[in-house]
Image (tube, rainbow, N blue to C red):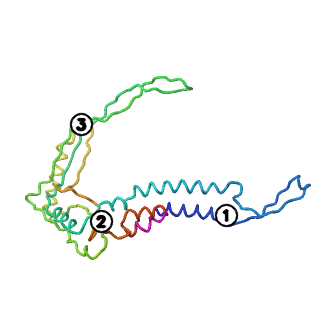
Amino acid sequence: CLLLSLLMYGCLGAVAWCHVTTVTRLTFSSAYQGNSLMYHDSPCSNGYVYIPLAFLLMLYAVYLVECWHCQARHELQHRVDVSSVRERVGRMQQATPCIWWKAISYHYVRRTRQVTRYRNGDAYTTTQVYHERVNTHVAEAEFDYERCGVRDVSKALVGLEGAPATRLRFTKCFSFASVEAENAYLCQRARFFAENEGLDDYMEAREGMHLKNVDFREFMVAFPDPARPPWYACSSAFWAAALLTLSWPLRVLA
């Protein structure tokens, strides 16, 4: 966003320079009986001013598309009050974590298909050879931590009421509180992938973590009163600044 704004400012500066600056031109014409004519004119009088204008319009269109897809605008759509944030955090802290593994066995099959190509305006059919992936087996499992136990160690949220707007980014991860828990995790993980290895030519391994029965949302913006957010957190202020190519300061504030 800032880079596009700087490029547009540069194009505007080039257009302003074309209108303000004058250069001395010297021309020779037969109408003046071989004498030269000296006059002052803009350096962009021969149509060169349209080059920065074309770049400006192109950059402005790209800039508006970038503003529509920017992360700050999407974050402002998830506006919640402070009490809802505390309730959601409480549900995530009490949710049951699931550390999962997934193994996908697959191989590639050589296939052929008929495609139509064109040469010198004439169409002809040829045979194309390609390889298609075929999944043959999918297995899933999760870490059994019943003997090790689990405990949430996330910090409590404080100071949300004192700020006009607070941007929150939630992440989830896990760590081991003891060597025994880590060894149990590594043993179960190694045993799962060893049981599914060799079932086909290749195996794709996936692993991750999620919270059961919780709609996990990564970004949220908390307001004491979502119905009356600060001026810089309003959609109208964002688009007004975007039309003036000044949305990058709002992205820092919002």
Marks 3 and 1, Cα distance to the nearest angstrom?
A: 71 Å
- Amino acid at circle 1: His
Query: What residue sits right under mark 3 in the picture?
Result: 200
Question: If you read the primary sequence from the N terminus, does the residue marked by circle 3 or circle 1 appear first?
Answer: 1
| Amino acid type at mark 3 | Asp
User: Which x, y percent locates residue 231?
Assistant: 37, 70
Q: Local crowd at mark 2 within 10 Å, few (<14), some, or many (≥20)?
A: many
| First to last magenta residue range | 244-250
**Label 2 with label 3: CB-CB less than 8 Å:** no
Task: List the residue tagged with mark 2.
Answer: 221
Which residue is tagged 1?
19
The answer to if 248 sits in the magenta stretch is yes
- Residue occupying the far front of the picture: 227
Q: Amino acid at mark 2?
A: Val
| Total marks in image | 3
Q: Nearer the viewer, mark 3 or mark 1?
A: 1
Alpha carbon distance from label 2 to label 3:
47 Å
